[in-house]
Image (cartoon, grey):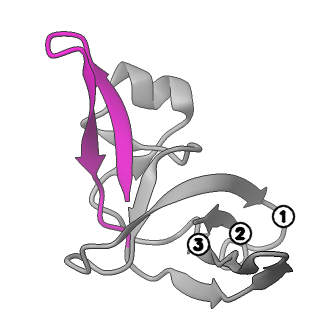
Amino acid sequence: MFNRIYDPVFRKYILQPTVIEGVFWQEEARASRLQDGIYENNEVHIFIPFLAKATRSFGTYAEFQENPTAYYTLSPEDKIMRGISSGKSLTILEIHTFDYGSGGVKHWEVVAK
């Protein structure tokens, strides 16, 4: 996953990488039929357990803004990629938090396109 961080020196966003292990990746292939043909509307749902191992600790958005090298966070418009070198990144659209139940059940559901 890649968090977007604004660099005021270069006046552009840079991507801060974090490797997260033990996630479940579910691709959803959908299509819509329009007058001028078929429109693909594929989505990917990524389930990230709270207990997943990562190269950084998860932090709230405020903690991440204060120290982006120590934390990662999940935010819309950040990028996510399957595997370390697949080369195809997706944009995060939605994040749903499921923080009830036992520690092994708590997770985030990330919707990306």
The mark lying in front, picked from 1 and 3, is 3
Disc 1 to disc 2: CB gap under 8 Å: yes
Q: Which residues are magenta?
A: 1-20
Q: Which amino acid, mark 2?
A: Lys
At a point 68% along the width and 71% down the height, the residue shown is 103
Q: Mark 1, residues whose alpha carbon is within 10 Å: few (<14), some, or many (≥20)?
A: few
Disc 3 to disc 2: CB gap under 8 Å: yes
Q: Secondary structure at mark 3?
A: strand
Magenta stretch prevailing secondary structure: strand
Left or right of residue 85: residue 39: right
Give the mark, 1 or 2, whose residue is nearer the N terminus. Answer: 1
Q: Which amino acid, mark 1?
A: Tyr
Q: CA distance from mark 3 to mark 2?
A: 6 Å
Give the mark, 3 or 2, whose residue is nearer the N terminus. Answer: 3
- Compared to residue 58, the image places residue 31 above or below, namely below
- Compared to residue 48, the image places residue 30 above or below, namely below
Occupied quadrant, residue 6: top left
- Identify the residue under disc 1: 100
Asked if the magenta segment contains residue 15, the reply would be yes
Query: Residue 86 placed where, x, y %?
Result: 26, 80
- Identify the residue under disc 3: 49
**Which numbered marker is on residue 106?**
2
Q: Mark 2, residues whose alpha carbon is within 10 Å: few (<14), some, or many (≥20)?
A: some
